[in-house]
Amino acid sequence: MQFVDEASIIVEAGKGGNGCLSFRREKYVPRGGPDGGDGGHGGSVYLIGDDALNTLIDFKFQRFYKAQNGQGGMGRQMSGKAGEDLHVKVPVGTTVIDEDTLEVIADVTEIGQVVLVGEGGRRGLGNIHFKSSTNRAPRRTTPGTEGDRRNLRLEMKVMADVGLLGMPNAGKSTLIRSVSAAKPKVANYPFTTLVPNLGVVKLGMHEHFVMADVPGLIEGASDGAGLGLRFLKHLTRTRLLFHVVDVAPFDESDPVEAAKAIVHELGQFSPALSERPRWLVLNKFDLLPEDEREERAQKIIQALNWEGPVFRISAISSDGTDKLVQAAYRWLTEQRRLENEDEEALAREEEMRRRMEEESVARTEARLGRRRKRDDEDDEDFDDDDYDVEVEYAP
Ligand SMILES: Nc1nc2c(ncn2[C@@H]2O[C@H](COP(=O)(O)OP(=O)(O)OP(=O)(O)O)[C@@H](O)[C@H]2O)c(=O)[nH]1
Ligand SMILES: [Mg+2]
């Protein structure tokens, strides 16, 4: 799954300091010569690639970046201090675009890569420079020039490694809140999540993976019920799916039926996606008395003929979530290693992508057919063009 994380910022380099107009004034030295010093150059703004950052979220809170102005020149031939440069850290993988000309200024692809985005203003010259044989008392100076000011758009493509799948209210957003810094809205009603959310799950300094929370699915979604299946396509590029099941729905609906419905909808939407590695994540165990838990788990596992990994968690109290994300991280790392080593695995992955693309084309065609039939219906929901989603951060 590919999300585009975006931010708009303004960078402003420092103004150059003005040159100074001054004459020597000392006792016993009448009519001293010019001694106005130069201004200092304005500080420049640079972006620098940093691998400790994974998202552009910080730029939503701070939009304005200004380097220091150069100091003005002073009497007694003293130059002003240059303004300090400003280095703004951006995640590796950031594309920098001039928002006014839409020109791509740079792709930050390496750690420590430095990109000049705002050049500091030039210093002004003091009157000391303008002394000549004909003019011994020049009153001329030059002003410092303005620093560059630019509106920049930062864009970063984020791939989600793990996608969450489940009924509305299953606790998907609660899970992502508990294991990452993302804070999507959580509420006890269906369809709380309306747009996909991304969370970066950190396990250590450099160990992390990205998890995507998408709106819940319900039975009939493949025919357009609820929010439909359009969000599922965002899961097609994840490596691993967590099927989150609420083991104790508050409306006392049957968790087994709910779990089956998801598997069914997934198969309807995309046979290829339903072959993606998937783990069963049984959630809200805290709501069951201890002596009923295992029985409930077994019931769901058997009804689904489930043979893959199963995790029992309580997203709200973070019970079992550490184990889950650690297992996922190990699995993802192993998977990447295999893919790097094994050309066959790579080819399988390519083949899977190709199939998903074909399916997507077929779905679009089928929808167009349906649309022609009922063209009075609201077809906004069936827009296939929103493949790239802007990442939504909760405030
Ligand atoms: N007791 C308990 N409640 C939970 C747990 N996980 C989630 N909930 C509650 O279940 C409700 C739904 O949680 P959400 O995280 O919003 O569910 P969701 O799957 O994101 O729902 P949609 O966005 O509507 O698809 C909220 O009231 C949560 O507080 C849990 O482990 N235990
Ligand atoms: Mg949600």
Image (cartoon, grey):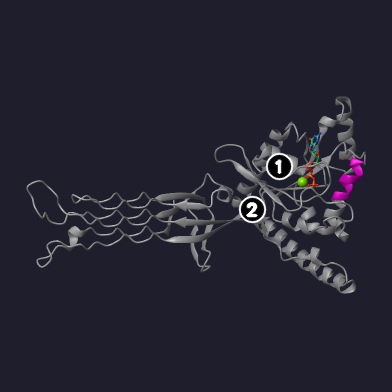
Residue to which mark 2 is pinned: 159
| Residue 330, position as x, y percentages in the image | 65, 40
Q: In which quarter of the image is residue 138?
A: bottom left
| Residue 306, position as x, y percentages in the image | 84, 42
Residue drawn at (18%, 60%), measured in percent from left and top?
Answer: 129
Q: In which quarter of the image is the N terminus?
A: bottom right
Work out whether 319 lies above or below 210: above
* Amino acid residing under circle 1: Ile
Left or right: residue 209 compared with residue 361: left
- Rendered image: mark on residue 176: 1
> Within the magenta stretch, is there residue 145?
no
Left or right: residue 27 compared with residue 305: left
* Amino acid residing under circle 2: Met
In front of the other: 284 or 379 = 379
Q: What's the magenta region? A: 254-262
Q: In which quarter of the image is residue 267?
A: bottom right
Q: Residue furthest bottom?
A: 372
Give neighbour class at mark 1: few <14, some 14-19, many 20+ (Cα, 10 Å): many
Nearest to the eye among marks 2 and 1: give it.
1
